[in-house]
Image (spheres, grey):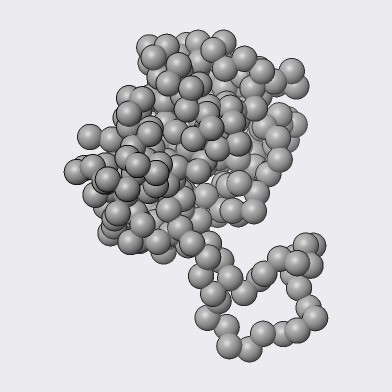
Amino acid sequence: MTKLEVCCYSVDCALTAEQAGADRVELCASQADGGITPSYGTLKLARQKVTIPVHPIVRPRGGDFCYTQSEFDVLKSDVACIRDLGFPGIVVGLLDPEGHIDMPKMWEVMALCGDMAVTFHRAFDMCVNPKVALEQLTQLGVARILTSGQQQNAEVGLPMLRELNELSRGPIIMAGAGVRLTNLQKFVDIGLSELHSSAGRQVPSTMRYRKAGVTMSSDTDFDEFSRYCVDGDIVAAMKTALEFGDPLSRTA
């Protein structure tokens, strides 16, 4: 049966995803950055409370995936911390300035990971040659590749996802970016065994008092009184569709 990984930006969301039937959680901070390394407190609480596999992202900042030596040192320290906390896997990715997998740095990361499963994240979608990257990641021994098929969303990337899945002799090809209830079956139909979704919605802040004219964000249009949260009903519906099939997902 196709597995569903849910991207979560808090322990509360991870617990919602677990209760709704998710198979695994990718734990991140900062949705606006596309996911960066969660805080130590978040990691520790997730280990205590979430029973399904949790794979934290290890990404020292938003933006590109070509890191300075200081940023790489931070990344390695975070990998070691996550390993020592007992997580079963991590999500990580590094590129060199020319858009290739940064093999020397990735070998260092793999050595630090021990028994943890490694997912190479959507840095893959920014690399210059996905087929060469697949060969390199196979050599590294990564467990899976999270990818949209090098497109803005995975539905547009279906042809590349199919090709990568047929070519892979090691890493699981996991579709992510725009995977939702209405298009799930398209990914199942090309043979993918794992899917990644945020499965969420914006929810309003519980704050009743809202100070006008003051913002903590550099983006003055950013709504600080709402946040993105996992929707348990959506996760449950996606799991049901994956288990039993859903006419909506087949006709959308």
Provide residue 230's location: percent of width, then percent of height: 43, 59
* x and y percentages locating residue 25 in the rendered image: 39, 47
Q: Is 86 placed above or below 226 here?
A: above
The C terminus lies in quadrant: top left
Image side of residue 220 versus residue 2, left or right? right
Above or below for 216 versus 69: below
**Looking at the image, which residue is at 55% across and 76% down?**
205
Q: Taking the image as drawn, is residue 48 in sight?
A: no
**Residue 49 appears at what percent x and percent y?**
33, 59
Q: Residue furthest front?
A: 251
Could you tell whether 181 is left or right of 245 in the image? Answer: right
Of residues 34 and 46, the one drawn nearer to the viewer in this rendering: 34
Asked which quadrant contains residue 92, the reply is top right
Q: Is residue 26 above or below residue 76?
A: below
* Identity of the residue drawn at 67% across and 85% down: 210
In the rendered image, is residue 200 in sight?
yes
Quarter of the image holding residue 102?
top right
The residue at 54%/12% (across/down) is 131
Q: Residue furthest left?
A: 244
Quarter residue 242 falls in: top left
Q: Residue 158's spot in the image, x, y percent? A: 47, 27
Q: Which quadrant is the N terminus positioned in?
A: top left
Q: Looking at the image, is 46 positioned above or below residue 192? A: below
Number of numbered markers: 0
Query: Which residue is depicted at the point 52% across and 81% down?
Result: 206
Asked whether 183 or 141 is in front, the reply is: 183
